[in-house]
Image (cartoon, rainbow, N blue to C red):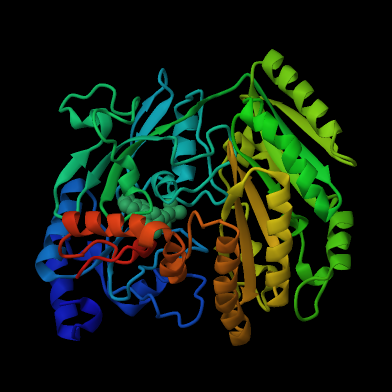
Amino acid sequence: MTLSAATDSDLARALERFAGELGQDAVAGDPQVLQAFRDPFPLGDPDEFRAAGILSPSSVEEVRAIVRLANELGVALWPVSRGRNNAYGGPSPRRRGSFIVELSRMDRVLEVDEDSALAVVEPGVRFFDLYDHLRAHEHRLWVSVADLGWGSVLGNGLDRGMGYTAYGDHAAMQCGLEVVLPDGDLVRTGMGAMSHGAAWHLYAPGFGPAVDGLFRQSNLGIVTRGGVWLMPTPEVFTCVDVVVFGFDDLEPLVDALRPLKLDGTIEGSAAIREPMLATSKLDARSRFYDGAGPAPEEAVQEMMRAHGLGRWTLSFAVYGSEARVAADLQAIRRAFARVPGAEVLERTYAGDVGADDVALADRTRAGIPGMYSETLPDWRAASPGSGRHVCFSPVLPLRGRPAIELATRLREIVEGAGFDYIGTYHVGKRHLSHVVEIIWDGTEDAQTAAARGVFGELVATAAELGYGEYRTHIAFMDQVAAQFDFNDHALLRLQRKLKDAMDPNGILAPGKSGIWSGR
Ligand code: ADP
């Protein structure tokens, strides 16, 4: 039985059985509650990915009970931590009729180890919560935060989200997971596999094949706790913006940046943004352009003048002792002096600066959570709240030529479909993740259809250049997975083998990342 095909009475019985395990207040199936767990930015029919019910366990044992019952009833589960995966589907399940297992009630900070600079948290802990906990207990530790502080620390890392400090690679900063498997078994990864493992959250690999990666962007387990490495509060930090004024200046900017990433001068995250992202936080698009189609270049130039922005701005920070930061800054100034017309802006703070004393644009670089990109979806909205966005996120080399080539081609496609080309290049050690924001007004059906339609062209264009996506909206998971086609899709075949072995009834997050079970 699959619930999408099941009758109302099957559904009512399933909800009743879940309520028997969790209590009535932890189970919901009424339309009002389901409404709150829909993708806030649907790409068409808002019910395309509708859940059958919402389950809110409070403990690991309850999660295990849910999984066992799902196997018995033959219903699908879709686990989320806080379900704020907006622009990628929010809390919505890939398969309609799945039960969302939302973990917001499991929201304890279980441990903070100041000496080893780490925390152990449950999946319901948000960036806001961990930040507040660290400040309330006067820990000299920073958490790396995403753009929106309401997301969960663990869920964001499990979907390979990013922050903006030296610890901005959130998946890489997770160390040691506890996971409920699709058959209800419970494992602890790495050194946590020992009953008294003392190095669980210090050394991720453990002994033998490491399995943590199996639980990221996957449907092989529900993570119920995890270790997160935190950054010791630095003596000082300097936020650096490198501003260039021509669209094609992206190329020399990226090439000047690469050696600084490779030699560790810029240790952590960096991001290169075009000016509409910053403008969306400060101003209304309609002040610059109110016509149909994408904002013309003159309007973009006007935004740049109004807010003192470049055509591209590279933003990052350097952290450490005063001497180290001073030496890093010297190397940084030297490197970007070679980029014609580039301006380097610097703002230095003491590591223990109060949140209010950090400029708004610098706060994510200081690990201070907020709702910084909250206004972005309404960039094209006809009325407040009617805006939508979806992200297209290909991965390419950290080199200038590929970056400008991709930017130019994607801009043509996106603008050709009637959208602004708005994007960020997130900078890794050797790669760029280009996150292109497609933003539209949800009350305009033609725009919604165009947003969905253009995606296929973007995926195909990136694939032609050899670039696959690092993450995608639920509506495009099959399409994106299909691009990974070496040797007749050998990787996907392996992922499906694992899926069938670990989840023979196919109850956990069917379709996540394009992985469906044999059933
Ligand atoms: P956020 O932290 O932004 O609220 P979500 O909770 O929406 O993020 O999680 C993002 C995605 O990561 C989910 O769609 C799901 O696929 C996966 N995920 C989140 N939490 C868990 C978890 N505890 N166990 C397994 N997968 C998870």
- In the displayed orientation, state which residue is furthest to the front: 487
Query: Split into 4 quadrants, where in the image is the C terminus?
Result: bottom left
- Residue at 28 percent of width and 55 percent of height: 494
**As displayed, is residue 109 above or below residue 147?**
above
Can you give x and y, in whole percent of width and height, for residue 196 in the image? 17, 24
**As displayed, is residue 438 above or below residue 313?**
below
Can you give x and y, in whole percent of width and height, for residue 281 in the image? 70, 57
**As displayed, is residue 148 above or below residue 290?**
above
Q: Tell how many labels.
A: 0
- In the displayed orientation, state which residue is furthest to the left: 72
Left or right, 201 with reference to 183:
right
Residue 8, picture quadrant: bottom left
Return the residue nearer the eye: 408 or 194: 408
- Residue at 20 percent of width and 32 percent of height: 193
Question: Quarter for ligand 1?
Answer: bottom left
Left or right, 376 with reference to 184:
right
Query: Split into 4 quadrants, where in the image is the N terminus?
Result: bottom left
Return the residue nearer the eye: 361 or 170: 170
Can you give x and y, in whole percent of width and height, for residue 207 in the image? 24, 28
- Residue at 51 percent of width and 57 percent of height: 469
Can you give x and y, in whole percent of width and height, for residue 308 in the image? 86, 49
- Tell me if residue 352 can be seen: yes
